[in-house]
Image (tube, helix red, strand yellow):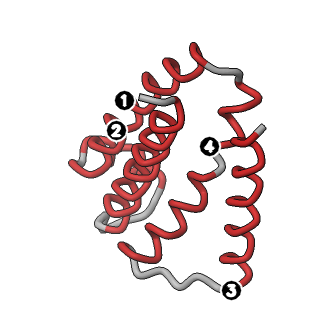
Amino acid sequence: MTIYILIFLNILLLVFGQILWKIGLMRLPNKDMITIVTSIFTPYIFLGVLVYGVATFLWLFILSKKDLSMVYPLQSLTYVLGMVSAYLFLNEKIPVIRWLGALLIIIGAYFIAKS
């Protein structure tokens, strides 16, 4: 497995965790701080925490193999995939300027990966 596949898997896990958290928070009847703190025991939030835990261990493995200056900027693709996921799974409206920003992130990640 190449390091890029592992980075992509890490990005998928991070985005999946965020989507789970957002769905879990959307299902809360109350959005005050106490409810948000106690929500960690709801299924979506708890599963999101577990997914983030797996992503963290994968990230530690990635860091043991490659330079931080190369792999960390590639994590910016998490923002792009998170935005696309919000559009597809949460029906969020994404303005054109954000799509353009995502394109710039993709171009930057491409140059970093090629170096």
Depth order, front residue of 38/22: 22
Determine which residue is flagged by label 2: 51
At label 3, which amino acid type do we have?
Val
First reached walking from the N terminus: tag 3 or tag 1: 1
Determine which residue is flagged by label 4: 75
Up-down: is 28 above or below 57?
below
Determine which residue is flagged by label 3: 96
The answer to whether 26 appears left or right of 32 in the picture is left
Q: In which quadrant of the rendered view does residue 46 lie?
A: top left
Determine which residue is flagged by label 1: 54
The secondary structure type at the circle numbered 1 is: helix
The secondary structure type at the circle numbered 2 is: helix
The secondary structure type at the circle numbered 4 is: loop
Q: Which quadrant: the C terminus?
A: top right
| Mark in the foreground, 2 or 4 | 4
First reached walking from the N terminus: tag 1 or tag 4: 1
User: How far separated are the C-alphas under marks 2 and 3?
Assistant: 30 Å
First reached walking from the N terminus: tag 2 or tag 4: 2
At label 2, which amino acid type do we have?
Val
At label 1, which amino acid type do we have?
Val
At label 4, which amino acid type do we have?
Gln
Q: Which residue is drawn at 62% across and 43% down?
A: 75
Q: Neighbour class for label 2 at 10 Å: few (<14), some, many (≥20)?
A: many
